[in-house]
Image: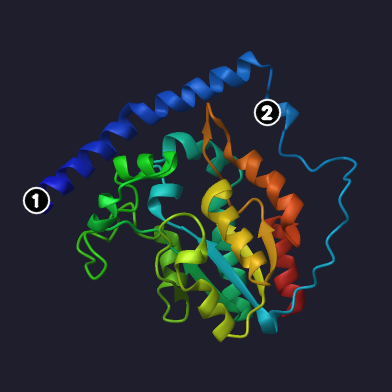
Amino acid sequence: MCENHDDKSINRRQALKGGAIAATAAAVATGMAATGVSAADNPYADPANPALPPSDMTLDLRRAALVVTDPQVDFLSPDGVTWGVVGQSVTEHNTVANIEALFTAAKAAEITVAVSPHYYYPTDHGWKFEGALEKLMHMIGMFDRPGALNLEGFENSGADWMPQYKQYINDGKTIVTSPHKMYGNETNDLTLQLRKRGVDQVILSGMSANLCTESHMRELLEQGFEVAVVKDATAAAVLPEGDGYLAALTNFRYMANAVWTTDEAVQKISEAS
């Protein structure tokens, strides 16, 4: 049974990388052209005349942490199963390099660093009902592992860390939380781990902007954390159903205590050190 499941996952992964997701991305591009949307319009630019009050968040490294959601191959690499729909956004925002810049700055400042990963085990494929994205992720074998206590085939798989992040995550100091199964950290131990370290300020980055990253922002805010989202250290899928990054960016601006670029976040960490 396990061997058949692995074969099916590999076949799904190859099929999606080979055409289905790429076709969807092409359809999105065609739709944008038909509506007159161009790169020059830059729908992600900050508003010229913002209506909301500016941030007054002051970073205090004694109680701050960098939190990175899903820094994994399936989201951030051309080898990942979602690249056909997230690749353009990841590339446009320089997301992979920006996340690494945050890791580097956080480690240099010796602040708490936590990674909140997404894993699915065989038992998770027995769920009786799912939302649209859950169905898709299960169908394509995204973040699949053979078991909670089994790392067989993990190295360089879609569930693995991006190679350039391993030196930061595997240093014996970074918190790797239990996996979140949906989108937010309500279902893992991130809040506990941060509270136990006296953290109440979070610099938030990772994937995917309108899913796990935004859900983590919402739950952390609800739990009384001060949250700064690093807007170019995340990215999202663009589908006929909508632009995930634009949806998230709107909510980041509405709800986060601060919305920074990577350069701003790195500078603030350096100045506070």
Q: Secondary structure under badge 1?
A: loop
Q: Residue 261, located in which quarter of the rendered image?
A: bottom right
> Looking at the image, is 18 positioned above or below residue 70?
above
Cα distance, mark 2 to mark 1?
48 Å
> Looking at the image, is 140 positioned above or below residue 100?
above
User: What's the residue at 80%, 68% (across, down)?
Assistant: 57
> Looking at the image, is 21 positioned above or below residue 111?
above
Type of residue at label 2? Ala
Q: Residue 19, located in which quarter of the rendered image?
A: top left
**Rendering colour mode:** rainbow
Q: Which residue is mark 1?
A: 1
User: What's the residue at 55%, 23% (across, down)?
Assistant: 29
Within 10 Å of the Cα at label 1, are there few (<14), some (14-19), or many (20+) other Cα atoms? few
Front residue of this view, candidates 263 and 173: 173
The picture places residue 252, in percent across and down from the top left corner, at 70, 52
In the displayed image of the protein, which residue is found farthest to the front? 128
User: What's the residue at 36%, 41% (across, down)?
Assistant: 135
Answer left or right for 259 relative to 1.
Answer: right
Q: Which residue is mark 2?
A: 39
> Looking at the image, is 105 positioned above or below residue 172?
above
| Residue 270 shows in the view | yes
- The mark lying in front, picked from 2 and 1, is 1
Q: Earlier in the sequence, mark 2 or mark 1?
A: 1
Answer left or right for 144 relative to 218.
Answer: left
Q: Quadrant of the C terminus?
A: bottom right
Front residue of this view, candidates 80 and 166: 80
User: What's the residue at 74%, 67% (across, down)?
Assistant: 267
Within 10 Å of the Cα at label 2, are there few (<14), some (14-19), or many (20+) other Cα atoms? few
Q: Secondary structure under badge 2?
A: helix
Type of residue at label 1? Met
